[in-house]
Amino acid sequence: LLVTMAGRRLIAAAVACCLCLVGQLASALLDDDYPKVRRHDGALLPLIGIGVGNLPAERMNEVVTYALASDMGYRLIDTGASNEVALAEAIDNGLESVTEDETVSIHVITKVWYTHLGYERTKMAVRESLANLKAFQSGQYVRVHILLHWPRCNDEISWMDCEGEEERLPQHVKDAGPPPHLDPENAWKGSWKAMEELYADDELRQIESIGVSNFGHEDFKALIEECEIVPHIIQGNVWSLMFDPWLVNMVRENKVIFQAYNVMNGIVKRGDVAPNAYQLLRNIGEDLGPFTVAQTVLAWLVQQDVSVIPRASSLSHQDDNSPYWLSSVPTLSDEEKEEIERAVKALLKGEDVEAPDSVLATVTNSLDIAITIFFVDEEGEEVLAHEEPVEPGDSIQLNTHPGHVFVAYNDDRSFEMVLEVDAEYGQRQHLEVAEPESVAATFLNSLKEVINVFWVDEEGEEVLAHEEPVEAGNTLELNAHPGHLFVAYNHDKSIRKEIQINAEYGEAQHFDLGEL
């Protein structure tokens, strides 16, 4: 595709603001201290939630009750019409301990499926969703947000079956209104009019907000031009957020909240297609916390007032990606935001960023004396790697390469420690200079029999030092301490060899059992 210079400028401008697309929407921290964003009508929406639309019904109760009962801060749940009853029951179970005097709001986003597009079908679908989600005692705490799931059914999308799905609908749905796939350009417009009326119904007063999902920039433009009530939310693939600048500009200009899905599968789980970009995200996450790649990307979106609803694939991921943890990620610098954006685009497109040409090594001095770091070149010569000594407790960073070797000395060189870089390009490695905590003891079995090695403890008890016997001619390596005593036996204990460790910490000691 050819992009004109004007188009490039538009893309560049949109990219610059795509992650501040709701820059005029002030995110807020209320009583629960978790991020929220202000809608264009002044109400607040939690920015971080979980997606349960495709969750098997048998797992719904476990996932939702855990989310609500834990201290992770979840108050936003995204679902679809097929899961509404199971979700409502799970919310009811999760809020058992809440009294009517307490102020609790659980925001549920549900959707109208494309088979129910059109004025009458949508009115019927919305009323059914409200009844489903308000069916239990906890319904008083549920704030329902209704979206149009798709602007139309499209047979060019492999999993959509427009005529087949229409044929399989219950008769009462068919009777409610004409098949929407026969009028694909206008059916959703009737749906939006129905949703506007239901939202504005003073007697109903059960819909918190209305919006759309999976609308491209052309459909969204048509909606903005015709609507009486501007959508509060647009839910879309994170791809659209990054690569549809026309849509992003309209969303920003109309102060609509963008809620991103497919962050995990589209970005976080694609490290194999863009490993350098993935490593870049890992490095940033490590510097920030450390935080995982998922936490880093989700927090980056949230800090730009983009709502996120990762699927609740496991309870551990629920914890990791919760409001509690994502709000604990430090505020990103402009440079970090730019680097994350660069990596995210590379992962989405499968076009990797250029590999860094070095390893960033951090050397920490955990001794109580100053040390000096030298690089050991290919000829074994030691070259000063850092001009100033590294004081106790301090760290330095070195740009180096895989396989490079450094050595650390104190002033009189009575202390020496070799440091080897085994990280790959683009990765980071932490090298700690500390007092060795063991003696590297090597036992060579030069006997003609299999032997077992035991450690003799302070009370004289013999404790097996290695689970497997040492075959004849083989070597056993153990981390030991100065003064430790070992004993080696053959199978019937007719041979007994005592081994005393007399080396100091950080040294190595070799024993040939045949010579003892």
Image (spheres, rainbow, N blue to C red):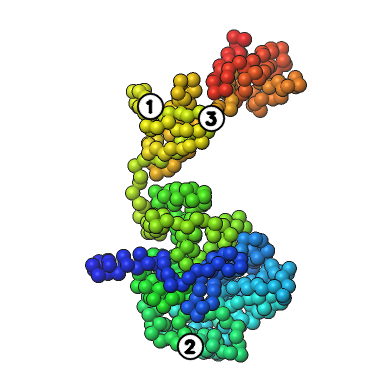
* Lower sequence index among marks 1 and 2: 2
How far across and how far down the image is residue 454, in percent? Answer: 68, 21
Q: Which residue is mark 2?
A: 193
The amino acid type found where label 2 is placed reads: Lys
Residue furthest out toward the left: 5
Relative to 54, does residue 119 appear above or below in the rendering? Answer: below
Relative to 474, does residue 18 appear above or below in the rendering? Answer: below
Mark 3, mark 1: which one is toward the viewer? 3
The secondary element bearing badge 1 is classed as strand
Using a 10 Å C-alpha cutoff, classify the residue at mark 3 as few (fewer than 14 neighbours), some (14 to 19) or many (20 or more).
few
Q: Report the side of 318 relative to 288 (left or right).
A: right
* Lower sequence index among marks 3 and 2: 2
Q: Report the side of 352 relative to 82 (left or right).
A: left
How far across and how far down the image is residue 88, in percent? Answer: 66, 73
Using a 10 Å C-alpha cutoff, classify the residue at mark 1 as few (fewer than 14 neighbours), some (14 to 19) or many (20 or more).
some
Quadrant location of the C terminus in the rendered image? top right
Q: Which residue is mark 3?
A: 368
Instruction: Give the CA separation, mark 1 to mark 2.
Output: 74 Å
Rendered image quadrant of residue 186: bottom left
Tell which of 199 and 110 is nearer to you: 199
Q: Are marks 1 and 2 in contact (CB under 8 Å)?
A: no
The amino acid type found where label 1 is placed reads: Val
Q: Which residue is mark 1?
A: 376
Instruction: Give the CA separation, mark 3 to mark 1.
Output: 24 Å
Asked whether the viewer can see residue 217, the reply is yes
